[in-house]
Image (spheres, helix red, strand yellow):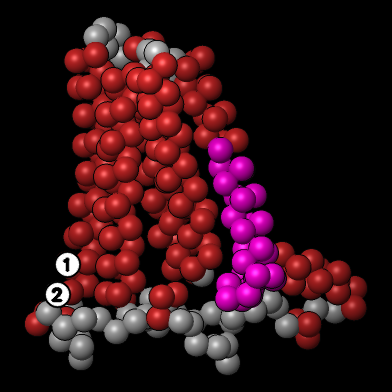
């Protein structure tokens, strides 16, 4: 069977199912590799956690925290390489005005990502269906349109936060380091891609895209706020 029904807030795209345990059946394994089954079950058990219980929340948050730490380590390394190797360095950036122009170029690509999501929703809405989406009816939970709208709304929110963080860095970051903003753009785009892929498989897997999408802008604005108050 497809397992228990998901809550509306965690609805999956239409036509997709998932065994709610996320585990393989022991009969799929021979005695020789039973250890593989145990390892598989242990690895996926957090996806079966009940978020309505303290134990479930702790299990979920432990995994979320691990993903966030790993994402920050990778992003920090990428930014370090960007600065030291000189990736995305533009010699013409010589003033704060130039820095604002530079990050405005970054926001062009963020805008394209948002436009792609809006186009995705429009394409699904224009497809003939029994729910009569074209007439303004709300899509049912778990439908393709419902999933696309959820992801697009989240992307709109994250685009606004990302844009503010880019502008904040343009006004406070040393000009020699302004190329970091382009590295963060690449991280943000990859994060959006991982968010869609993860969410389509399981709601909890959104964190693999949410961490690289949300954490860098928050830290960037924290840095900018510190520079404004102290610097």
Label 2 crowd bin: few (<14), some (14–19), many (20+), radius 10 Å = few
Residue at (23% x, 63% y) in the render: 120
- Give the residues in magenta: 45-72
Main SS, magenta residues: helix
Label 1 crowd bin: few (<14), some (14–19), many (20+), radius 10 Å = some
Image-based side of 33 in relation to 126, left or right = right
Q: Where is residue 149, by image quadrant?
A: bottom left
Residue indicated by mark 2: 126
Image-based side of 39 in relation to 112, left or right = right
Under tag 1, what secondary structure? helix
Q: Mark 2 to mark 1: distance in Å?
A: 6 Å
Residue indicated by mark 1: 122
Residue at (78% x, 85% y) in the render: 27
Q: Is residue 207 above or below residue 190?
A: below
Image spot of residue 224 (x, y percent): 38, 25
Residue at (40% x, 37% y) in the render: 217
Image spot of residue 48 (x, y percent): 63, 75
Which quadrant does the N terminus fall into? bottom right
Q: Where is residue 153, by image quadrant?
A: bottom left
Image spot of residue 215 (x, y percent): 47, 42
Image-based side of 78 in relation to 160, left or right = right
Image-based side of 119 in relation to 226, left or right = left
Residue at the limit of the structure toward the left, as seen here: 135
Q: Nearer the viewer, residue 227 or 139?
A: 227
Which quadrant does the C terminus fall into? top left
Q: Is residue 23 above or below residue 89?
A: below
Under tag 2, what secondary structure? loop
Say whether residue 181 is magenta.
Answer: no
Asked whether residue 200 appears in the rendered view, the answer is: yes
Q: Nearer the viewer, residue 109 or 59?
A: 59
Labels 2 & 1 near each other (Cβ < 8 A): yes
């Amino acid at each position: 069977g497809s397992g228990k029904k998901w809550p509306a807030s965690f609805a999956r795209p239409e036509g997709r199912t998932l065994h709610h345990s996320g585990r393989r059946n022991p009969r799929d394994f021979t005695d020789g590799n039973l250890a593989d089954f145990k390892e598989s079950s242990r690895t996926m058990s957090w996806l079966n956690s009940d978020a309505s219980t303290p134990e479930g929340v702790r299990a979920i948050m432990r995994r979320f925290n691990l993903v966030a730490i790993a994402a920050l380590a990778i992003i920090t390394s990428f930014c370090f390489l960007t600065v030291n190797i000189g990736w995305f360095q533009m010699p013409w950036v010589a003033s704060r005005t130039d820095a604002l122009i530079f990050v405005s170029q970054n926001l062009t690509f963020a805008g394209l990502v948002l436009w792609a999501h809006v186009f995705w929703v429009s394409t699904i809405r224009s497809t003939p269906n029994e729910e009569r989406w074209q007439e303004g009816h709300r899509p049912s939970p778990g439908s393709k349109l419902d999933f696309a709208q959820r992801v697009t709304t989240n992307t709109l929110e994250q685009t606004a936060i990302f844009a503010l963080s880019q502008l904040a860095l343009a006004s406070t970051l040393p000009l020699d380091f302004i190329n970091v903003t382009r590295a963060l753009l690449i991280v943000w785009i990859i994060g959006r891609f991982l968010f869609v892929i993860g969410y389509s498989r399981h709601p909890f897997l959104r964190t693999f895209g949410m961490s690289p999408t949300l954490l860098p802008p928050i830290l960037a604005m924290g840095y900018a706020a510190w520079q404004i108050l102290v610097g």
